[in-house]
Image (spheres, rainbow, N blue to C red):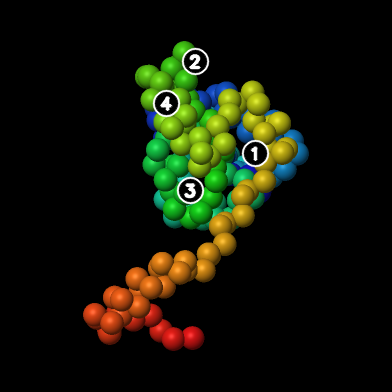
Amino acid sequence: MIFVACGTHHQPFDRLVVAANAAGQHETVVLQRGASRQPAPACEVHDEVSPERFAMWLREARIVVLHGGSSSFLEARKVGRTPIIVPRRPEFGEHVDDHQVRFAASVSDAAIVTEPEALVAVLGRFREPAPPLQAPPSPLAKRFAALVAAWHPDTAPPRR
């Protein structure tokens, strides 16, 4: 399942709804449509969703696609997701200024940024990066922990 969220801004984001509908021709798409009224018959459409349901879809989706809002992005990162970000653009009447475009550019190392017209192609090649492996502590970290434990024995890590 692909989860696509247009956000709750009062201006519609019809370009993302059209792209989500195109993706829905190939895979199940759950779409939070917001203020858009563009039909998306190939999607499971929800105009608004509760924060709990939003969080559930972030966790359960194979791919997460979000508008360029910082709150949505932070929620996705909080549950370990690498979202695809599609920023709203003021020149299309999707927002009042270009802050979503600027925000998307600033987080491009932690997300994939694309335009709606390229979304289906990006979805076709997107693979969620594996979470980083927990690296063993470095020798310096081990020495530092031993020093702290010597000064404060109650903070010593458990022995294995």
Please tell me whether mark 2 or mark 4 is closer to you in this view. Answer: 4
Q: Nearer the viewer, mark 3 or mark 4?
A: 4
Q: Quadrant of residue 158?
A: bottom left
Residue receiving disc 4:
102
Does label 4 or label 1 sit earlier along the sequence?
A: 1
> Which is more N-terminal, label 2 or label 1?
1
Dot 2 crowding, Cα within 10 Å, few <14, some 14–19, many 20+: few
Q: Amino acid at mark 2?
A: Phe
Badges 1 and 2: C-beta atoms under 8 Å apart? no
Q: Give whichever of 84, 52 is nearer the camera.
A: 84
Q: What amino acid is at disc 1?
A: Cys
Mark 3, Cα crowd under 10 Å, few <14 / some 14-19 / many 20+, is many
Assign a secondary structure to mark 4: helix
Instruction: Please tell me in which quadrant of the rendered image residue 42 appears.
Output: top right
Task: State how far apart marks 1 and 2 are (Cα).
Answer: 23 Å
- Distance between mark 2 and mark 3 Cα atoms: 26 Å
CB within 8 Å, label 4 to label 1: no
Q: Which of the 4 image quadrants contains residue 20?
A: top right
Going 45% across and 42% down the picture, which residue do you hit?
A: 73
Which of discs 1 and 2 lies nearer the camera? The answer is 2
Image disc number at residue 76: 3
Task: State the residue position of label 1.
Answer: 43
Q: Is residue 119 above or below residue 154?
A: above
Q: Which residue is mark 2?
A: 92
Q: Is residue 46 visible?
A: no
Neighbour tally class for label 1: few under 14, some 14-19, many 20 plus, Cα within 10 Å: many
Nearer the N terminus, badge 2 or badge 3? Answer: 3
Q: Secondary structure at mark 3?
A: helix
Is residue 133 visible to the viewer in this orientation of the structure?
Answer: yes
Residue appearing at x 35%, y 71% in the figure: 144
Task: Name the N-terminal-most of marks 1 and 3.
Answer: 1
